[in-house]
Image (spheres, coloured by chain):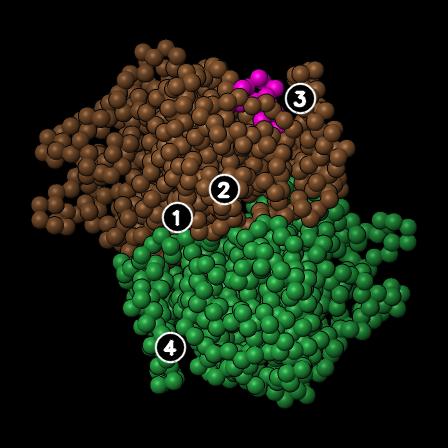
Chain colours: A green, B brown
Amino acid sequence: MLPRGRPRAMGAAVLLLLLLLVVGFFLFGRDPDYGLGTTATLDEDPYRSRNLSASSPQLLLPPKCEVMLHVAIVCAGYNSSREIITLTKSLLFYRKNPLHLHLITDAVARNILETLFRTWMVPAVVVSFYDAEELKAGRTLRSCSARPTFFFLSAPLVSWIPNKHYSGLYGLMKLVLPSILPPSLARVIVLDTDVTFSSDIVELWALFDHFSDKQVVGLVENQSDWYLGNLWKNHRPWPALGRGFNTGVILLWLDRLQQTGWEQMWKVTAKRELLTLMATSLADQDIFNAVIKEHPHLVHPLPCVWNVQLSDHTRAERCYLEAADLKVIHWNSPKKLRVKNKHAEFFRNLHLTFLGYDGKLLRRELFGCPNQFPPGAEQLQQALTQLDEEEPCFEFRQQQLTVHRVHITFLPHQPPPPQPHDVTLVAQLSMDRLQMLEALCRHWPGPMSLALYLTDEEAQQFLHFVETSPVLSMRKDVAYHVVYRDGPLYPVNQLRNVALAQALTPYVFLSDIDFLPAYSLYDYLRASIEQLELDSRRKTALVVPAFETLHYRFSFPNSKAELLTLLDAGSLHTFRYHEWPQGHSSTDYSRWREAQAPYSVQWSADYEPYVVVPRDCPRYDPRFVGFGWNKVAHIIELDAQEYEFLVLPEAFSIHLPHAPSLDISRFRSSPTYRNCLQALKEEFHQDLSRRYGSAALKYLTALQQARSRA
Amino acid sequence: MLPRGRPRAMGAAVLLLLLLLVVGFFLFGRDPDYGLGTTATLDEDPYRSRNLSASSPQLLLPPKCEVMLHVAIVCAGYNSSREIITLTKSLLFYRKNPLHLHLITDAVARNILETLFRTWMVPAVVVSFYDAEELKAGRTLRSCSARPTFFFLSAPLVSWIPNKHYSGLYGLMKLVLPSILPPSLARVIVLDTDVTFSSDIVELWALFDHFSDKQVVGLVENQSDWYLGNLWKNHRPWPALGRGFNTGVILLWLDRLQQTGWEQMWKVTAKRELLTLMATSLADQDIFNAVIKEHPHLVHPLPCVWNVQLSDHTRAERCYLEAADLKVIHWNSPKKLRVKNKHAEFFRNLHLTFLGYDGKLLRRELFGCPNQFPPGAEQLQQALTQLDEEEPCFEFRQQQLTVHRVHITFLPHQPPPPQPHDVTLVAQLSMDRLQMLEALCRHWPGPMSLALYLTDEEAQQFLHFVETSPVLSMRKDVAYHVVYRDGPLYPVNQLRNVALAQALTPYVFLSDIDFLPAYSLYDYLRASIEQLELDSRRKTALVVPAFETLHYRFSFPNSKAELLTLLDAGSLHTFRYHEWPQGHSSTDYSRWREAQAPYSVQWSADYEPYVVVPRDCPRYDPRFVGFGWNKVAHIIELDAQEYEFLVLPEAFSIHLPHAPSLDISRFRSSPTYRNCLQALKEEFHQDLSRRYGSAALKYLTALQQARSRA
């Protein structure tokens, strides 16, 4: 039953493995974290050698760890990137073998998924990326010398195929996988992004052993009547064997496909059919079916449970009512989760299980599988286990070491067009501040980059919140970056750094979520940057004076004059005037009242103004978690790097009232918490002295004075 | 391999089934929802008749739906009740067959778990309760005529056995299960509460078929060296075969146990060993092992993966490093999740999966299994599917129909001693108000009943929050009831009703979480109730006047005099004076300033004071979900039932500032939301007219006047 020539292929695989290692470096050299975990042992497959009879109904599973399972998925855009994560969670939940994901993506999905997988740090998972846009356009990658030829053997043009399916051209990309994936890869499971696993994928992989010599493609029969035709007048589907096959789940025997001349075969069929049918309706699926109709010996039919299709007019019920097990659910209706199905609730629940599943729980190792840790994970694990649980600041130490999963641009986003004076508002929040977003959008018409600290479940609530808000769903210039919760302390500065790193304009306004900027602030800041002839090399921090109101309902001032009236009437105060005046005293509010032009101010102890700075400004110090001193340290860093603080005479923003956060409550009630914060401050100053030498002396002096006063 | 006499046993089972139905009614007649789902088809087991050879290594699983799997668990107290829920979630997640849970509980666990399972509404799950306290005391239940004798055949005394294990006497109860469980029940799986499943329990059930004729107990070998002895000087364990067996997971062949004279057997052995050993160290496990040492033919050893024991000095690693699958994890160390184990992180993640798993997702049916819905569930499902998703108030309708899972007394609780004038503070909150709890505890030294609206994950965060707060962990008179989140609108009145139903004192103070009562309020209320000679039959609502501050940090007044000073200084206001004066105008604050004695006030439109009423007061109307009118409707109900409103001259409570809730933000920004609320009001008034006739006219008039003003 084994394909002839296997030993030779195995030898070639070893050689290719070495090549891949070298080439991987060039391909992804800029980002050393392109893949996770161990080196991929491409298709070293002991299971294959056990010579199982394909006629045996018995399913022998390969031993754990020893087989690397390969999965290819085409994924483009923001929404598919969210889908693929849910699919991946369901895969990881049940799997007991190492996985190699081959992701064919556009630039958007690649950006999102590279960050996600790098920060997810799942052991025994390797991820490789392939550029879908180049494939779509059909540039022959042989000519692109920076990329290895054998990664993209004769990548064909798919954009010549007219297609009416909602998946667009990306759907067609499954046809060219045999040419895209490394030739060393003998077999691969191809999945649509809209499937959910409810079993171990190794059971699906084991079905390769049921293939006869001639079979190259494993598919589940289509569960709708589409290919039978006559669904409506002039309904003319592509030709198919019986009710045809569905391509949401495919077992592809790649090396055999190459041998049978697959590329030529599907092109000939597609071109011929397109003469009469004009376009594909169901993308790649039409072409797969037309080829199979002509060459039925190529297909190995799979049990229906491996692709239970929940489209509107489905016969899926026949499948799952008889089966004890559902293996893979396929949401192959454009309505997705809202599909009408008698048992929709059941299937939704399976899907929601992984939608809300805490992804960090999947960072579990596979026992007995060697060398499975992604780069850095093992060292991190060691550092974490070396912490002393009895030490009073243990929670702080643990939180600082935590690597949070990060899903950048969680929702569709249109990056702002490049403009030399543009400013992005940068802030972070958790679930309890969602209700600020609409007001913020009304006050700031420009781009925003917001980090949200959420559980996986909350991320779904957030999605619903945005989708049902007319104000928020309209705004495509707000980028939301989800940082997944892990640990008891709010990692405020890590969140700020994520939002800051994703800002795309030359300048950023470093704000907080409880502040509403003056309606005119966005325009005013851009005008000021232009007038002051700032450029991003000049180290200037424009100060936006901060005020606060204590009233729930409050009529926001339309001008500086109105603001001053409210201030004099006692309806407004300068920010934290009663509790923490040193935080903003350097801004010099009395000078600001009269000022007509920007004026320069000097740093003083505990200064923490809200500032506009070039995007490449210093990052926030991530050691400050929870409440306290997180902005102060950043302003010190700016001052140490000789940024000039320039207060803008017409700029202001106003803090709205809210209940104290859990962290501030703990700060107030726990002496340990306050002691730990003090320890962090001292460590920060030691680092500062190390980096800036005697120039950092003034900060230390200020700290010591504060301590002697306390 | 089949036990002889099976056909007779089957006939008996059918007869017993009928008897059980009748008897179940008597046993649980007071609470018709004692069990969930379909009628239990006790042990009708088609799988059993398939005559599998026990020597066959092949595991044939019974067809889905056809076998009812029986599981017995001993559970006592608050903490075990939380544990058993996590265990149950893991069971339900993987199961594909109907389940019958036999829970041997104390009164505390029964109270919690009956509510939980009734509101959980999982299809194809039956729950039966057995009274552990009676068993422990050893009362012979034959004499208790209200209970069926065959449910408690010769329930033996276990309290005579001296036991040093942390599980206390409850651990020993596993020995008497053959006498407790219905004789119709041939086989049962017995589980400790501290196990987590990571596979389908039907695979464990299938191992009964590997038993030889003589074997009656299936057990996994112990994975510690305990029974080998000599762990320390004078370490003398009970006798055991080799390293002995662990009793965290037991397959019990009940009818065979009865036949072999199990009861006599273990008692003889236990009494003999106790002559020299004085007490059991590991509860039932010591006795099981001593019996097996004497009668080794009784035990069927199970594969180690079915009870991977994570105690401190465990050999479990040998088991799971070799196995591809872990089936059941057993946290059998007193340290539980904090056990030191090289792979602790892995196991913790498996456990946390179900700790944080959204239990409502387990409300999924088993396909092809007939008649599996718990009482009411099918009708509810129909009502939900009949809602029109396009209707503007769909979300409101859906939220009103939602049955939330309820976990009463989530944390250990000491009910207050019965006192005729005692008052419980009743309130509800979600995660964003946790930080109010400590302050509330300082202001209210009396009993509280609080409903918390949380996800399963948040419930764990809440647990951690209470455990790490010195103020909260001290207070055992605060009962926390978790209502699990489901749906987009805050079910405020359903939450209030849960908290109200669990209040145990004759009076309740119906408050809100953002209010802090005067320090003296608890004492003052009790004194007032006594002085006014109220009794719970007199319909009086004592009004506690409400104030508000807009300041984060605020020095709480120690007396009415201090409060009046703050009020005059403008640091305090009467509650919602600016936004919603009609809510409290009837309280008549100017009269209150001068009042020396309680005074009576009349209802007026939109009145919503905070009141102290007898515990049996009318419930809140659950149709009001989200923001608006939820308290107003309750006060109307009190007025319609002719409660007298009596303002207390020295009582007050003060509202602290917080950001507007999501619901109030939606109310303000969405005309649809406001229209839906208006529709709810009108329906409420129609019901009111129906119930109170012309007496309800004044409320309708007030509503119409308000509408004409709007």
Q: Along the polypeptide, which appears first: circle 1 or circle 3?
A: 1
Q: Which mark is residue B567?
A: 2
Of labels 2 and 3, the one closer to you: 2
- For numbered disc 2, what is the local secondary structure? helix
Tell me the kind of residue under disc 3.
Leu
Same chain check for tags 3 and 4: no
Residue in the image at 41% along x and 47% along y: B555
The quarter of the displayed image where residue A431 is located: bottom right
Q: Which mark is residue B688?
A: 3
Of labels 1 and 4, the one closer to you: 4
- Magenta span dominant secondary structure: helix
The local crowd at label 3, few if under 14, some if 14 to 19, many if 20 or more residues have their Cα within 10 Å, is many
- For numbered disc 1, what is the local secondary structure? helix
- Left or right of A620 in this view: A173: right
- For numbered disc 3, what is the local secondary structure? helix
Tell me the kind of residue under disc 4.
Tyr
Query: What residue would you read off at disc 4?
Result: A699
Q: In which quadrant of the rendered image does the C terminus of chain A lie?
A: bottom left
Same chain check for tags 1 and 3: yes
Query: To which chain does the residue with label 1 belong?
Result: B
- Left or right of B38 in this view: A630: left
The local crowd at label 1, few if under 14, some if 14 to 19, many if 20 or more residues have their Cα within 10 Å, is some
Residue in the image at 60% along x and 78% along y: A598
Q: CA distance from mark 2 to mark 1?
A: 35 Å
Query: What residue would you read off at disc 1?
Result: B465
Magenta-tinted stretch: B632-646
Q: Nearer the viewer, residue A55 or B309?
A: B309
The local crowd at label 2, few if under 14, some if 14 to 19, many if 20 or more residues have their Cα within 10 Å, is some
Q: Nearer the viewer, residue B561 or A292?
A: B561
Query: To which chain does the residue with label 4 belong?
Result: A
The relative height of residue B228 versus residue A443 in the rendered view (above or below) is above
